[in-house]
Image: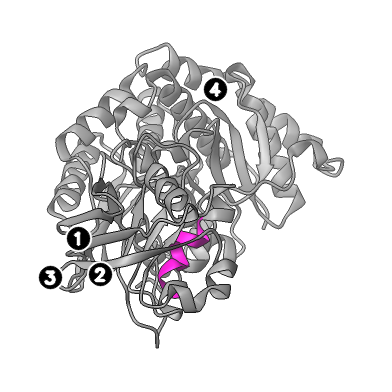
């Protein structure tokens, strides 16, 4: 299940390499430019409806009811499946063209009880979160001396000293893309030097003694050793002690284990296109979360602005030429299982563009765009220009979202929501991912952007080129 996560997890945070200012759009037809600009009044109507009209505050309120009712929604859990049932019934009541679920095979992972103590040079409780996919400690505690490193290169150089110890990878946060490799591969690297277990400094630039979970992988042929995240504070504490010459020992107990294969579901809602129903504009987010917090930021917000975009168009009596589809993925956190199954099931359908919001629903700035065609980029630039009223006109190149991996590889244009998400990784995969992270007005703005952009892409007389 986790064999491909090494590739996909490194893409979770967008890496930006160009902006719309560098695009040469001189060859874009002026007829297309004029057509896009003709949507200005419609864009304004959508924005007003969501931001200051009947839709004001509804995305926040609907999401709060959802996450307060179900809490976190880990793959394989009853809470996730109950939340999917809830969403299906809610979407049916919205009278969309079609609402359905599609089966997805998943391999759940369960945390179980876990506890860690620093036992030398003094006794101190350590706040930990086992990493997703980790094995447990075999119904017993593992106690070992701690060997601290800040990079994998340092670990390799000190392999003899690390053998038989609990390795602490104390890698400071640089960017998510640069630092997440330590979470994903720490167990492999530590097992390669015959460590007992591995502790990882949480992948975050900020902490209030908050550990961050997330997926990791093992390598065939190497032992599977327990892996858990510790807080920045505890990682630095142990590193300072060891640097002074103290012997640091830790006792670790984890019941983590993978469970038998089971079935979850993607949730799909359509507004059927009036003229070209077989051409699809896909907007999406994921309903599942890790087993901490409420999964409000990651990714309740992205899922809810997606179906709320459809509801907004229904309320305004707007039906696009093409089918507009909201997909609420399952099992994103444990391996992109939902989007992978959807792409395989719908491989023969024509997706004009695939969109995902999974980097937070904060103050919107525009779109992250990925596509091979310069013409498609230029069309996207014109479309986001319709959002000047909410100052969200940026178009940048980068990874638009982890669940869009399959579409990007197939050459389908893809877009992600670009927001002012500088604090996203403060709360990512922690108990702190709750409604308190989100802002009512910002969710409205994200809903408005998502609705305007998806509607125009779905209604334009020209299809985005590949």
> Which is nearer the N-term, disc 1 or disc 2?
1
- The image quadrant that residue 389 belongs to is top right
Q: How many marks?
A: 4
Q: Is residue 30 left or right of residue 275?
A: right
CA distance separating discs 4 and 1: 42 Å
CA distance separating discs 3 and 1: 22 Å
Label 1 with label 2: CB-CB less than 8 Å: yes
Q: Which residue is mark 4?
A: 42
> Which is nearer the N-term, disc 4 or disc 3?
4
Q: Nearer the viewer, mark 4 or mark 3?
A: 3
Highlighted magenta segment, given as a residue range: 180-188
Mark 1 secondary-structure assignment: loop
Considering depth in this image, is 260 or 378 the residue closer to the camera?
A: 260
CA distance separating discs 4 and 3: 61 Å
| Residue 107 numbered tag | 2
Considering depth in this image, is 231 or 316 the residue closer to the camera?
A: 231
Q: Which residue is mark 1?
A: 76
**Secondary structure that dominates the magenta span:** helix
Q: Give neighbour class at mark 3: few <14, some 14-19, many 20+ (Cα, 10 Å).
A: few
Residue 267: x %, y % from top left: 28, 51
| Residue 454 numbered tag | none
> Which is nearer the N-term, disc 2 or disc 4?
4
Q: Which residue is mark 3?
A: 139
- Image quarter (top left, top right, bottom left or bottom right) of the N terminus: bottom left
Residue 273: x %, y % from top left: 45, 44
Mark 4 secondary-structure assignment: helix
Residue 37: x %, y % from top left: 68, 26
Q: Nearer the viewer, mark 4 or mark 1?
A: 1
Residue 62: x %, y % from top left: 26, 28
């Amino acid at each position: 299940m986790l064999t491909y996560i090494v590739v996909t997890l490194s893409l979770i945070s967008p890496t930006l390499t160009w902006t719309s200012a560098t695009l040469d759009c001189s060859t874009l037809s002026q007829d297309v430019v004029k057509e896009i600009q003709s949507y200005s009044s419609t864009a304004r109507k959508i924005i007003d409806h969501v931001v200051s009209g009947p839709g004001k505050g509804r995305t926040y309120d609907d999401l709060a009811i959802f996450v307060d009712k179900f809490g976190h929604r880990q793959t394989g859990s009853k809470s996730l499946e109950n939340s999917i049932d809830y969403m299906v019934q809610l979407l049916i009541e919205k009278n969309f063209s079609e609402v359905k679920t599609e089966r997805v095979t998943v391999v759940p992972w369960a945390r179980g009880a876990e506890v860690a103590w620093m036992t030398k040079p003094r006794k101190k409780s350590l706040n930990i979160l086992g990493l997703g996919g980790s094995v447990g400690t075999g119904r017993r505690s593992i106690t070992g001396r701690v060997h601290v490193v800040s990079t994998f290169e340092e670990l390799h150089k000190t392999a003899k000293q690390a053998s038989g110890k609990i390795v602490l990878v104390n890698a400071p946060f640089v960017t998510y893309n640069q630092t997440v490799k330590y979470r994903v591969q720490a167990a492999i690297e530590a097992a390669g030097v015959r460590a007992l277990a591995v502790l990882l400094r949480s992948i975050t630039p900020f902490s209030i003694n908050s550990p961050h979970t997330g997926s990791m992988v093992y390598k065939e042929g190497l032992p599977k050793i327990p892996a858990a995240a510790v807080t920045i504070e505890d990682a630095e504490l142990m590193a300072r002690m060891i640097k002074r010459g103290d012997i640091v020992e830790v006792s670790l107990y984890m019941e983590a284990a993978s469970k038998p294969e089971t079935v979850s579901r993607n949730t799909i809602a359509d507004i059927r296109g009036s003229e070209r129903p077989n051409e699809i504009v896909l907007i999406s987010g994921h309903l599942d979360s890790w087993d901490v917090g409420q999964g409000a930021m990651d990714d309740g917000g992205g899922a809810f602005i997606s179906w709320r975009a459809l509801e907004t168009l229904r309320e305004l009596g707007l039906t696009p030429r093409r089918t507009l589809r909201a997909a609420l993925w399952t099992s994103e956190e444990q391996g992109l299982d939902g989007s992978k199954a959807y792409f395989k099931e719908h491989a023969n359908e024509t997706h004009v563009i695939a969109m995902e919001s999974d980097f937070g629903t904060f103050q919107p700035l525009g779109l992250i765009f990925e596509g091979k065609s310069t013409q498609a980029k230029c069309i996207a630039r014109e479309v986001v220009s319709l959002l000047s009223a909410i100052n969200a006109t940026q178009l940048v190149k980068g990874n638009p979202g982890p669940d869009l991996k399959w579409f990007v590889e197939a050459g389908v244009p893809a877009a992600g929501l670009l927001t002012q998400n500088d604090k996203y990784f403060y709360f990512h995969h922690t108990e702190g991912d709750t409604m308190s992270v989100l802002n009512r007005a910002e969710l409205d703005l994200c809903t408005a952007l998502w609705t305007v952009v998806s509607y125009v892409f779905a209604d334009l007389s020209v299809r985005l080129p590949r």
